[in-house]
């Protein structure tokens, strides 16, 4: 590609070239350089400038004071004549002070880059008003005495000139500090070339560039156009490459020749940077994919480790349950054997005591019966002997009355014997009653023996309960194995870790009877080895999973 023509920097310009910005950098106020002072003019003496500043400041203050005093008196008398009354003393101050305040506000807002042009317009309006009011102070119309009107009108001009001079100085210094001093085309240029000067002024405002920069850019683009015409002839617009025509096309946007020629290079650099950024993003994406794969592998390892841990815990639980079951069986058997031995011992003792009591009662009853039988036999023997004696006595010695008396006596003795027999019978019945009491005692002993047997049955029932607990432990072990199998199936299904944890919590809830409150966050933390917040999230996801399962079952049932 043909290199673009270079602008001859030795072109004779009115002032030395001052760049508005470096090539490749945006044209910002900070990058602009204040136009240099014209060469060939020696710098003024600082003492002279200081003296001029003192004279200008002092004289300006004096002129402002004179103008303000004269304007104040004139406006006060005019206000009194117009019926302002006491307010006539404040009216002139409001007019003249308003000019100062509005101009100061305009400078302050401009310095803060919040310009409000209406403030300057109002200040200029007050300036025209104070001149008009002073000119109208003489009696009669202005045409009646133009000289007097001019004399009154000149007085406030002194004050206004001093204020405007101060505003111009402060505004220019503030604009220079902020980098916004655009300047203005010279009056001579306006007079000599009005239309080109208007175009330059227009570009100054559109591009926010100083007058010198705009002139320099116009000269540069004019020289560049002539160089293209010299290189490619009259058809240079068709023959010149598009990159070399960029300065001509971009001149309307305020770009210099160098800035326009650097656009392709900047675009190429931007494209290169975009490609590098795309490659960087691609590498970051690959790294992210590798990181996700590594995290997935890590989660898989964690899952396998958790499954192995669960298996080991299940084995430990099973061994512990078997140990507890054996201990419970041994304890129950020992307790049952001890209780049975104690019951049998108590039963033997009570049975021996009952047998002894029955034997004693039977012996006593038999002895009483034998004694009563002997006494009856003895009484019968005595009675028979007495009868024989009575008969002998009756037959031999006694009379009938004596025999009768002896017969009555014999009957009385017989009745006494019968009473003794009745008492012996009562004793025999009492012995039989005691025998029945002994039998009752033996029944009580039998009842205690039955209670002991019931206690043995209770011990056997406890043994069966222990066996049931063992069966429950075995069922839990099988459930744990089922959980492990489910966890392995879920791992094989490539479920994420939160989903697997949620389903495990769902199984815990189902194992607790379907009551979510039965499974606490602490149990979930211990079971999953997570924090409380994560446990709450897993429980919430588990409830959602159970709800989805229930809705699916209801839809299938429908």
Image (spheres, grey):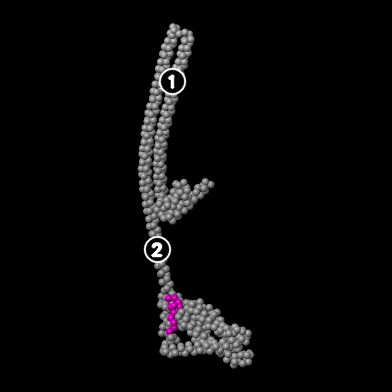
* Other residues around mark 1 within 10 Å, as few (<14) / some (14–19) / many (≥20): many
Q: With respect to residue 79, does 293 lie above or below?
A: above
Residue designated by label 2: 284
At 40% from the left edge and 58% from the top edge, which residue is drawn? 292
Badge count: 2
* Other residues around mark 2 within 10 Å, as few (<14) / some (14–19) / many (≥20): few
> Is any atom of residue 233 visible in this view?
no
Left or right: residue 44 compared with residue 82:
left
Q: Secondary structure at mark 1?
A: helix
At 52% from the left edge and 84% from the top edge, which residue is drawn? 195
Q: Which numbered dot is residue 19? A: none
Q: Position of residue 293 (x, y in %)?
A: 39, 57
Q: Secondary structure at mark 2?
A: helix
> Is any atom of residue 180 visible in this view?
yes
Q: Position of residue 2 (x, y in %)?
A: 41, 77
At 41% from the left edge and 49% from the top edge, which residue is drawn? 487
Instruction: Decide whether residue 232 is among the magenta residues.
Output: no
User: The N terminus appears in which quarter of the rendering?
Assistant: bottom left
In front: label 1 or label 2: 1
Q: Position of residue 214 (x, y in %)?
A: 47, 81
Q: With respect to residue 483, does 93 lie above or below?
A: below
Left or right: residue 390 compared with residue 93:
left
Q: Position of residue 381 (x, y in %)?
A: 41, 13
* First to last magenta residue range: 25-36
Residue designated by label 1: 424
């Amino acid at each position: 590609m043909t290199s673009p023509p270079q602008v001859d920097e030795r072109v004779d310009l009115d002032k030395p070239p001052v760049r508005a910005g470096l090539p490749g950098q945006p044209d910002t106020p900070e990058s602009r350089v204040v136009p240099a002072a014209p060469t060939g003019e020696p710098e003024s003496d600082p003492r002279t400038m200081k003296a001029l500043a003192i004279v200008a400041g002092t004289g300006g203050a004096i002129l402002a004071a004179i103008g303000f005093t004269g304007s104040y008196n004139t406006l006060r008398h005019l206000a009194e004549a117009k019926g302002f009354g006491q307010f006539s003393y404040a009216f002139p101050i409001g007019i003249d002070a308003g000019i100062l305040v509005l101009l100061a506000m305009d400078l302050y807002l401009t310095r803060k880059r919040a310009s409000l042009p209406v403030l300057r317009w109002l200040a200029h309006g007050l300036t025209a008003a104070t001149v008009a009011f002073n000119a109208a102070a003489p009696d009669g119309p202005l045409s009646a005495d133009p000289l007097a009107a001019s004399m009154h009108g000149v007085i406030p001009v002194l004050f206004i000139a001093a204020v405007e001079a101060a505003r111009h100085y402060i505004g220019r210094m503030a604009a220079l500090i902020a980098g916004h001093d655009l300047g203005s085309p010279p009056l001579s240029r306006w007079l000599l070339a009005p239309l080109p000067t208007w175009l330059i002024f227009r570009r100054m405002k559109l591009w926010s560039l100083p007058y010198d920069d705009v002139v320099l850019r116009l000269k540069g683009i004019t020289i560049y156009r002539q160089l293209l015409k010299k290189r490619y002839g009259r058809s240079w617009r068709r023959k010149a490459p598009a990159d070399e025509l960029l300065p001509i096309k971009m001149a309307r946007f305020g770009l210099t020749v160098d800035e326009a020629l650097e656009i392709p290079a900047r675009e190429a650099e931007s494209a290169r940077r975009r490609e590098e950024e795309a490659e960087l993003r691609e590498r970051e994406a690959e790294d992210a994919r590798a990181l996700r794969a590594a995290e997935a592998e890590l989660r898989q390892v964690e899952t396998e480790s958790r499954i192995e841990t669960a298996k080991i815990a299940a084995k430990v639980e099973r061994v512990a349950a078997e140990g507890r079951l054996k201990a419970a069986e041994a304890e129950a058997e020992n307790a049952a054997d001890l209780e049975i031995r104690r019951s049998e011992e108590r039963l033997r003792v009570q049975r021996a005591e009952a047998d002894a009591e029955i034997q004693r009662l039977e012996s006593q009853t038999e002895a009483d019966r034998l004694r009563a039988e002997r006494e009856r036999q003895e009484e019968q023997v005595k009675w028979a002997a007495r009868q024989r004696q009575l008969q002998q006595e009756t037959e031999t010695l006694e009379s009938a009355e004596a025999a009768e008396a002896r017969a009555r006596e014999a009957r009385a003795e017989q009745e006494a014997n019968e009473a003794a027999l009745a008492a012996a019978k009562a004793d025999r019945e009492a012995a039989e009653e005691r025998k029945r009491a002994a039998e009752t005692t033996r029944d009580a002993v039998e009842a205690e023996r039955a209670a002991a047997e019931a206690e043995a049955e209770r011990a056997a029932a406890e043994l069966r309960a222990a066996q049931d607990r063992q069966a429950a432990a075995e069922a839990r072990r099988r459930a744990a194995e089922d959980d492990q199998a489910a966890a392995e199936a879920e791992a094989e299904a490539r479920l994420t870790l939160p989903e697997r944890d949620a389903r495990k919590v769902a199984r815990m809830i189902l194992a607790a009877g379907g009551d979510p409150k039965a499974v606490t966050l602490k149990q979930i933390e211990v079971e999953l080895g997570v924090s409380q917040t994560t446990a709450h999230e897993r429980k919430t996801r588990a409830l959602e999973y159970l709800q989805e399962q229930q809705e699916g079952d209801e839809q299938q049932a429908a």
